[in-house]
Image (cartoon, rainbow, N blue to C red):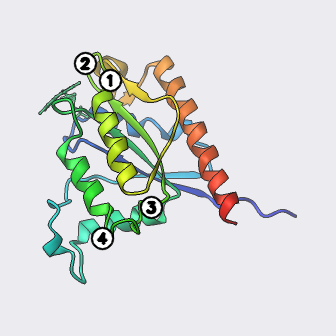
Amino acid sequence: MTASPAPVRITAISGSIRNGSHCTAVLRSLDPLLPAQVKMEIFPLNDIPLYNADLEGDALPESVARMKASIAEADGLVLCSPEYNYGIPGVLKNAIDWASRPGFASPLKGKPVLVMTASPGTAGGVRAQAQIREALMATLARPLVRQHIAIPGVAAKLQEGRLADAPTLQVIQEGLDDFLREIRWLRNAHS
Ligand code: FNR
């Protein structure tokens, strides 16, 4: 009898901490697109303090320790972020900075990341997406090299806090399929 493959764990992080966030709504829409053995946790950034190396003593701030543990235990990360002033929102950059320590040996090192951006505007946050990918590369994470997922006009594509636009869900489904293939490929390479 062959053993069933270990479950895949995904940590999802929204680049927006507001209650009505479109990006968090996109992340809430992913569960039905994932196979049953894939478990996804949305980790909110609301309690993450501003990065300060003075706080990186023996005991990290509790919220930061929880975020780093969630990333460390995950097989991969899914990010969905808005764009602020043509760039990466401060809360997300701040979280990446915390998670990136110790430099080049952090929980982000080697971690596959599916990056998505969303905007009520027409560009879908592509400029933020470029900056997010750049920051992830600095941490030695593995932002997926594939067609980018940028969701323009996101406000009109949500219903009751979930994505309800079939073409967008299809694009995301293909991204998730590539992401899970990458996770399994990395598992095989390391087994
Ligand atoms: C924005 N917004 C925005 N949108 C965009 O497409 N490009 C941009 O450069 C900006 N800049 C920007 C700056 C600031 C300070 C705010 C508050 C907003 C609009 C932004 O995409 C919109 O508010 C989203 O709804 C934010 O994402 P959530 O919170 O809905 O996930």
Q: The residue under label 1 is which amino acid type?
A: Gly
Relative image position of residue 9 (x, y in whole percent): 53, 56
Q: Residue at x 51, y 38 (%)?
A: 145
Q: Residue furthest bottom?
A: 58
Mark 1 burial class by Cα count in 10 Å: few <14, some 14-19, many 20+: many
Which of discs 1 and 3 lies nearer the camera? The answer is: 3
Q: The residue under label 4 is which amino acid type?
A: Ala
Q: Residue at x 32, y 62 (%)?
A: 99
The first of marks 4 and 3 along the sequence is 4
Q: Which residue is mark 1?
A: 124
Give yes or no for contact between labels 2 and 1 (Cβ–Cβ under 8 Å): yes
Give yes or no for contact between labels 4 and 1 (Cβ–Cβ under 8 Å): no
The image quadrant of residue 47 is bottom left
The first of marks 2 and 4 along the sequence is 4
Q: The residue under label 2 is which amino acid type?
A: Gly
The first of marks 2 and 3 along the sequence is 3
Q: CA distance from mark 2 to mark 3?
A: 33 Å
Mark 3 element type = loop
